[in-house]
Image (cartoon, rainbow, N blue to C red):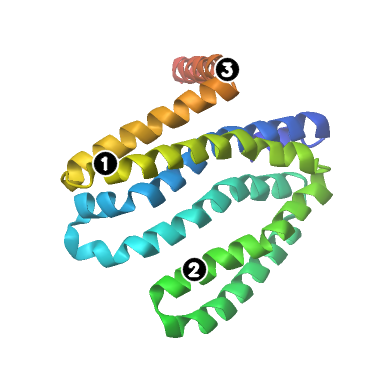
Amino acid sequence: LPAFARLQYDYDLMRSAFYLAIHYTNLISIPAFIGIVLVAPECIVVAFGPQWSLSIPVIQILAFIGILHSTFYFHNSLVIAVGKPSWRLAITLLNAVSNVIAFAIAVRWGIAAVAAAYVIRGYLLSPVEVWMVLSLAQVQLGKYLAQFVRPLLGALIMTIIVLALRPMIGGLGPYLRLAILSAAGGAAYVLTLHLLEPSLWPQVLRLLQLGFAGKQVGQNSA
């Protein structure tokens, strides 16, 4: 938010910062939440025990809304930075009302149905969120959607690898299955990103160096 606010009088720079924030967030959030869907059966058992196995489908369903929320976090910051908090309030009210309606309809079918209603409602109303940033900051739809392409392709390859590997290791214990699936899926995703975006890792290293240098300057000033 402070970064967007400082750039509010230079829309080109603000949009560039917005695209960059969305891109790097998607690089982490999309594989993370898709990974939760893929390894939830093992992860839940390992973390909480087999008595929590009934929560697995609920976790898998809710993971999909995490992708939206991580992206829309920057929508909120951008809208406030350009001086339109009333738009954010209107979207929040719309989401709240639609949630109540969706929950009231789905509750008779249980908690998994309520979770699914929450996710479906989020995706159905997501164009309103996107329209908001397109209107207020002249964000280009093509460039905005482009920030999702490579992370989604990487997550797709990761999904294929994990689904293909799962039957081969079905006889192993949950701890070992979780380790193998996580390692294989993570390696597949990183390799895919390296092939699709070879300049990514030098950029990440440079950002980490800048962040570390800024932290050091702040500590020295204090």
Is tag 3's residue or tag 1's residue first in the polypeptide sequence? 1
Is tag 1's residue or tag 2's residue first in the polypeptide sequence? 2
SS of the residue under disc 1: helix
CA neighbours of label 2 inside 10 A, class few (<14), some (14 to 19), many (20+): many
Instruction: Give whichever of 17, 164 is nearer the camera.
Output: 164
Instruction: Give whichever of 36, 208 is nearer the camera.
Output: 36
List the residue tagged with mark 2. 116
Q: Position of residue 97 (x, y in %)?
A: 62, 76
List the residue tagged with mark 1. 168
Q: Position of residue 124 (x, y in %)?
A: 66, 64
Identify residue type, mark 1: Met
* Vertical arrangement, residue 51 with respect to residue 44, above or below: below
Screen quadrant of the N terminus:
top right
Mark-to-mark CA distance, 1 and 2: 30 Å
SS of the residue under disc 2: helix
Q: Which mark is residue 198?
A: 3
Instruction: Give whichever of 47, 7 is nearer the camera.
Output: 47
Q: Residue at x 72, y 40 (%)?
A: 144
Q: Residue at x 47, y 18 (%)?
A: 212
CA neighbours of label 3 inside 10 A, class few (<14), some (14 to 19), many (20+): few
Q: Residue at x 81, y 30 (%)?
A: 12
Horizontal relation, residue 167 to residue 201: left or right = left
Q: Position of residue 158 (x, y in %)?
A: 44, 37
Q: Residue at x 63, y 39 (%)?
A: 148
Is tag 3's residue or tag 2's residue first in the polypeptide sequence? 2
Identify residue type, mark 3: Pro
Instruction: Give whichever of 15, 67 is nearer the camera.
Output: 67
SS of the residue under disc 3: loop
Identify residue type, mark 2: Ala
* Vertical arrangement, residue 31 with respect to residue 217, above or below: below
Mark-to-mark CA distance, 3 and 2: 37 Å
Which of discs 1 and 2 lies nearer the camera? The answer is: 1
